[in-house]
Amino acid sequence: MFARIFSTLVLWTITVLAIIYLKSLGWAAIICVLSAGALFETCKILDKMGASTLLKTAQFLNIGIFTAAWGLSYFGLFPFAGGAVMYALCCGFLAVSILRQPFGDYARKSVFPTILALTAISFPLQWLVILGAEMRSDISEYTGIVLAVWILAAAKFSDVGAYVIGAAFGRHKMAESISPKKTIEGAVGGLISSAAVSILFACGFAHILPEQFTPLAAAIGGAIIGAAAIFSDLLESVLKRTAKVKDSGNFIPGIGGALDLADSLLLTAPIGTLIISILV
């Protein structure tokens, strides 16, 4: 537990410092590094399942996706679509590469698994970067970043609430065959935690957030994000169980790998961005 708390504090400190000194560019760099780590681990898991992913190509394309997500959004080109446009181009590039070896296992074992990894990791996470770069208001340049961090916080507090309440009061298993430790009581605690931290965000940053982002709207949005985080975590559990691995990695003490850190964001990033676009 101490290792997990220490790692969490270090990661949040690095993130806050990057945001303070580099603003949306610092935020983009943090998410890009997280995506690169999660993408690496996902490719390794797929390789254990029989694939032969194009790891170096995937990392190069990941950088391209996040560069486009930040750059095109920051400078007002392709609003809310820069990363998606680059993602489509990357997938097209990989698809065309099949022509190198039109016969055999190249497409099935290399190209399609690599596209799957980019779709599962880079594409959803780039929405956090787009949000941070795109939504700069006359009041503050940090408006979009705060909203992106809200999505991250709501997702992570869903994990924290589910763990604490589940450990104390959990009795009824939620998905025992996928994740034996998850309980219905823990899930409810996670939703409440996500809603609570969302209210704190709405109140604490009211001076730089859109007026539509009321405590009530934040609580409802936070609960939705919390629910998405639970399902996103279950999807990663299915992948790891299929590949027969316990953790995606072990370089973050107490947490595991980058994919273990990013798993709850893979559904919540696009869903949270959609919620904000509806509210604002």
Image (cartoon, rainbow, N blue to C red):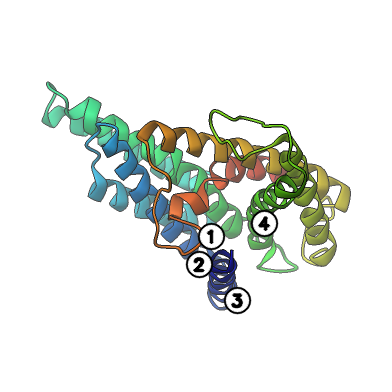
Amino acid carrying mark 3 in the image: Ile
Comes first in the chain, label 1 or label 2: 2
Q: Which residue is mark 4?
A: 153
Distance, label 4 to label 1, CA atoms, is 23 Å
Distance, label 4 to label 2, CA atoms, is 19 Å
Distance, label 4 to label 3, CA atoms, is 17 Å
Q: Residue at x 77, y 65 (%)?
A: 208
Q: Which residue is mark 1?
A: 74
Q: Which residue is mark 3?
A: 20
Amino acid carrying mark 2 in the image: Leu
Distance, label 1 to label 3, CA atoms, is 17 Å
Q: Which residue is mark 2?
A: 25
Comes first in the chain, label 1 or label 3: 3
Under tag 4, what secondary structure? helix
* Mark 3 neighbour density, 10 Å: few (under 14) some (14–19) many (20 or more): few
> Which label lies toward us, 1 or 3?
3
Amino acid carrying mark 1 in the image: Tyr
| In-image side of 215 versus 182 (left or right) | right
Q: Residue at x 58, y 36 (%)?
A: 180
Distance, label 1 to label 2, CA atoms, is 9 Å
From this view, report whether residue 12 is shown above or below residue 160.
Answer: below
> Which label lies toward us, 4 or 2?
4
Q: Residue 240, located in which quarter of the rendered image?
A: top left
Under tag 1, what secondary structure? helix
